[in-house]
Image (spheres, rainbow, N blue to C red):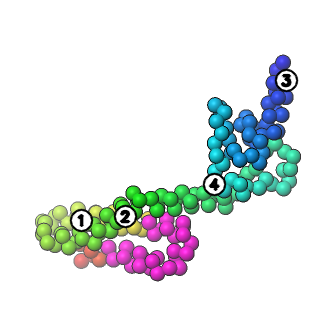
Amino acid sequence: NGEENTEKSDKSDLESGEPGTGTKVGSDRSTEASTGVPFPSPIGASSVVANPGSQGSSAPPKKSAAIRANVGQISLASLLDHWVSQSLLGLALVVTLLLPDLWVIFNPAEDHDIIMNLILVFFFAVFTIEIIVTSIVQREYVRSAFFWMDIVGTLSIIIDLTWTA
């Protein structure tokens, strides 16, 4: 009785791409939950190729590092292009451009300059991270004029710091 269940499990695993999932190798479904509800294949799963030496084995095909990196780039790109991210970066740009001038107009006490400096340093870090992420996601960005404009704009924040005056 116990041997029959083991044999059925092994046959099921051979027919499926992954042990215990019940999906067939090459099917459009990448996995099935314990409820039996199929999930769609992840991005790039159709391009996954099994290792040539593993033909006939029950091991699932392994994703290459390039496919995993591509999926990571897609999620970074979608995060960077999301309207919330773009709105926050736009707000950061407006604050960074106007804050030093408004600071001069409203003329707070000099001991409050640390507040402006910390805000500008924070946005300097935000823009630096944005440049790095965009360079990773969009290979052509580094060779564009936008890259150099972003670099010059980000570095110009240093000029507005009272520490450098």
Question: Is-magenta flag for residue 151?
Answer: yes
Report helix, strand or loop for mark 4: loop
Q: CA distance from mark 2 to mark 3?
A: 61 Å
The residue that disc 2 covers is 89
Question: Is-magenta flag for residue 144?
Answer: yes
**Residue 22's x, y, as percent?**
74, 36
Q: Which of the numbered marks, if any, corresponds to residue 79? A: none
Question: Is residue 83 something that shows in the picture?
Answer: yes
Which amino acid type is marked by label 2?
Leu
Question: How would you rate the neighbour count of disc 3 (Cα within 10 Å): few for under 14, some for 14-19, many for 20 or more?
Answer: few
User: In terms of secondary structure, what is the magenta stretch mainly?
Assistant: helix
Question: How would you rate the neighbour count of disc 2 (Cα within 10 Å): few for under 14, some for 14-19, many for 20 or more?
Answer: some
The residue that disc 4 covers is 43
Residue occupying the point 44% across, 59% down: 82
Which amino acid type is marked by label 4?
Ile
Left or right of 73 in this view: 25: right
The residue that disc 1 covers is 116
What span is in magenta? 130-158
Mark 1 / mark 3, whichever is N-terminal: 3
Question: How would you rate the neighbour count of disc 4 (Cα within 10 Å): few for under 14, some for 14-19, many for 20 or more?
Answer: few
Mark 4 / mark 3, whichever is N-terminal: 3
Left or right of 77 in this view: 56: right
Mark 4 / mark 1, whichever is N-terminal: 4
CB contact under 8 Å: marks 1 and 3? no
